[in-house]
């Protein structure tokens, strides 16, 4: 049992590092040094569906509005994001992706989908259920650490 646990632990660490590196490499191949992975994840949080307010986005990313403002300023300068003020309340700033920002979003989503398909390739329905349950367990563990205030 200890060998299995050690193997799982080693694989999780290796996978996390490799996935982050491969994703960064994928983005660098397409955009060079024009965008960082932090900016890619901000773009992913903005998404393509609807305008998001800065406060909604900051809460989603677990950062302050001030920190987000700096990030959005850079993404606007790079042409990946646009700002909008609402007609109802001009103090409210919303953001959306530009055409180029949507390309980055799509590249990021494709990468994540490719990971999922690689993970479940060749698995039976019941094996996929086991993988899904294991990932739910891991997610619950991480979420509880946030809820308990261990991570801020």
Image: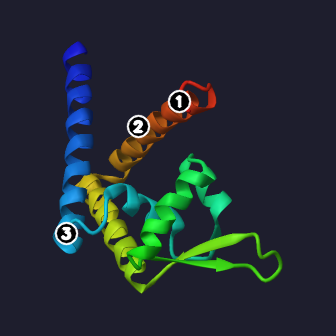
Question: Counting other residues with Cα less than 10 Å from the Cα at mark 2, is it few (<14), some (14-19), or many (20 or more)?
Answer: few
Q: Circle 1 — which element?
A: loop
Q: Toward which corner of the image does residue 111 lie, by quadrant? A: bottom left
Q: Toward which corner of the image does residue 146 lie, by quadrant? A: top right
* Closer to the eye: label 3 or 2: 3
Q: Circle 3 — which element?
A: loop
Report the front residue among 41 and 32.
32
Residue 115 point in image, percent of width and height? 28, 57
Lateral position of residue 125 relative to residue 94, left or right? left
Q: Are marks 1 and 3 in contact (CB under 8 Å)?
A: no
3D distance between C-alphas at marks 3 and 2: 36 Å
Q: Toward which corner of the image does residue 39 lie, by quadrant? A: bottom left
3D distance between C-alphas at marks 1 and 2: 22 Å
Report the front residue among 69 and 3.
69
Q: Are marks 1 and 2 in contact (CB under 8 Å)?
A: no
What residue is disc 1 on?
151
Q: Circle 2 — which element?
A: helix
Q: Is residue 102 above or below residue 114?
A: below
Q: Are marks 3 and 2 in contact (CB under 8 Å)?
A: no
Residue 93 point in image, percent of width and height? 67, 71
Instruction: Give the residue displayed 83% in from the left and 79% down from the top.
Output: 88
Residue 86 point in image, percent of width and height? 74, 79
Which of the marked residues, 1 or 2, is nearer the chain's N terminus? Answer: 2
Disc on res. 32:
3
Q: Is residue 15 above or below residue 68?
A: above
* Closer to the eye: label 1 or 2: 1
Which of the marked residues, 3 or 2, is nearer the chain's N terminus? Answer: 3
Report the front residue among 45 and 58.
58
Which of the marked residues, 1 or 3, is nearer the chain's N terminus? Answer: 3
What residue is disc 2 on?
134
Residue 51 point in image, percent of width and height? 62, 75
Q: Quadrant of the C terminus?
A: top right
């Amino acid at each position: 049992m200890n060998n299995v646990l050690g193997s799982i632990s080693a694989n999780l660490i290796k996978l996390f590092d490799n996935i982050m590196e491969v994703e960064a490499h994928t983005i660098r191949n397409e955009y060079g040094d024009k965008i960082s992975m932090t900016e890619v994840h901000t773009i992913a949080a903005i998404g393509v569906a609807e305008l998001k307010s800065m406060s909604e986005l900051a809460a989603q990313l677990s950062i302050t509005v001030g920190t987000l403002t700096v990030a959005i300023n850079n993404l606007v300068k790079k042409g990946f994001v646009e700002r909008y003020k609402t007609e109802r309340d001009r103090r409210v700033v919303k953001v959306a992706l530009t055409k180029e920002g949507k390309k980055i979003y799509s590249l990021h989503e494709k990468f994540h989908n490719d990971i999922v398909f690689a993970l479940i390739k060749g698995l039976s329905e019941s094996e996929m259920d086991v993988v899904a349950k294991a990932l739910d367990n891991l997610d619950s563990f991480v979420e509880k650490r946030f809820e308990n205030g261990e991570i801020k």
